[in-house]
C-alpha cells in the first residue's frame, strides 16, 4: 500500500501534456539502476546482519536476497516519485543561480568521516555516514551544475516532507524495525535521526545521475 501510494499519482501525471515526464523514463531508469544497486546490496547485508527487520504482518512474505519484495520495490517507487517531483518543480520554478564555493563541502565531508569513525560500532550509522562521505567527495570532484541552482537546495528541503510522511508510517506501525545496537537511538517522532542523512544522500544521488544522464544525452544530440 505504501509503495502504491508513493508512485500512483506521479505515474498517472507522467503523461500530462506540458510536463511529458514519460519522455524522460530512460534517464530515470539509469539513475535507478546506478544508485539502487549499491543501496540494495547494503540493504541485503544490513538485513542479514540484523540492523533492521521487516514486519511479516505487513508484507507479502515474498523475499528476494533476504528482502521482502516491497523493500525492493521501494527502490523503484521512491526514485520515480522523487524524480517526477523534481522535474515538476523544475518546470514551474525559475532557475536562480547562486555562487557556491565547492570547498564548503570539505566541512560536511570531514564531519561525515569523523562521525563514521566515532560510531563505527553502530553499523547503520557507520554505513549512512560512509555513503554520505562518498557523496560529498563526488560533489567536490565533479562540481555538478545543478548545485549552483537555488532551486536544488529548496527542493531538497521540500523532499523531506514526503520522506517524513512515508518514513513515519514505516517506523511507527512499525513495518520496519531497527536494531537498537545499530543506530544512535535519537529519533524524530518514530524516525531514527540517521534516516534523514540517508534520505539526503539517496535523493541527491538520484538527482545527480538523473541530471548527468540528461546532460550526456543533450551533448550527443548537439553533436
Image: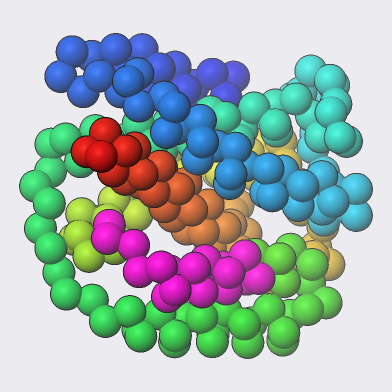
> Residue 115 placed where, x, y %?
64, 82
Q: Is residue 4 left or right of residue 147?
A: right
Q: Is residue 39 rendered magenta in the image?
A: no
Out of 169 and 109, give the one closest to the viewer: 109
Out of 47 and 187, give the one closest to the viewer: 47
Q: Is residue 13 above or below residue 77?
A: above
Q: Is residue 201 left or right of residue 83?
A: right
The quarter of the picture where residue 126 lies is bottom right
Q: Is residue 66 visible?
A: yes
Q: Which residue sits furthest front?
A: 223
- Kindly identify the residue that appears in the image at 78 percent across and 72 percent down: 122
Out of 22 and 67, give the one closest to the viewer: 22
- Kindly identify the residue that appears in the image at 51 percent across and 59 percent down: 201
> Residue 15 placed where, x, y %?
29, 12
The quadrant the N terminus occupies is: top right
- Kindly identify the residue that appears in the image at 39 percent across and 48 percent down: 212
Range drawn in magenta: 129-146
Q: Is residue 189 visible?
A: no
What secondary structure do most residues of the magenta stretch adopt?
helix
Q: Is residue 187 above or below residue 117?
A: above
Amino acid at each position: 500500500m505504501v509503495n502504491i501510494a508513493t508512485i500512483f499519482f506521479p505515474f498517472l501525471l507522467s503523461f500530462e501534456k506540458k510536463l511529458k515526464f514519460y519522455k524522460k523514463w530512460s534517464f530515470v531508469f539509469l539513475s535507478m539502476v546506478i544508485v539502487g544497486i549499491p543501496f540494495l546490496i547494503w540493504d541485503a547485508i544490513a538485513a542479514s546482519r540484523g540492523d533492521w527487520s521487516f514486519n511479516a504482518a505487513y508484507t507479502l512474505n515474498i523475499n528476494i536476497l533476504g528482502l521482502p519484495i516491497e523493500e525492493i520495490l521501494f527502490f523503484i517507487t521512491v526514485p520515480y516519485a522523487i524524480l517526477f517531483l523534481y522535474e515538476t518543480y523544475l518546470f514551474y520554478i525559475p532557475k536562480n543561480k547562486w555562487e557556491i564555493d565547492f570547498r564548503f563541502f570539505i566541512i560536511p565531508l570531514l564531519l561525515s568521516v569523523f562521525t563514521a569513525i566515532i560510531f563505527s560500532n553502530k553499523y547503520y550509522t557507520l554505513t549512512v555516514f560512509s555513503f554520505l562521505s562518498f557523496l560529498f567527495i563526488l560533489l567536490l570532484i565533479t562540481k555538478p551544475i545543478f548545485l549552483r541552482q537555488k532551486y536544488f537546495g529548496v527542493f531538497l528541503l521540500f523532499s523531506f516532507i514526503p520522506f517524513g510522511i512515508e518514513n513515519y508510517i514505516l517506523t511507527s506501525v512499525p513495518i520496519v524495525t531497527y536494531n537498537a545496537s545499530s543506530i544512535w537511538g535519537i529519533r524524530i517522532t518514530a524516525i531514527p535521526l540517521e534516516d534523514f542523512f540517508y534520505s539526503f544522500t539517496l535523493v541527491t544521488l538520484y538527482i545527480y545521475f538523473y541530471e548527468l544522464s540528461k546532460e550526456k544525452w543533450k551533448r550527443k544530440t548537439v553533436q
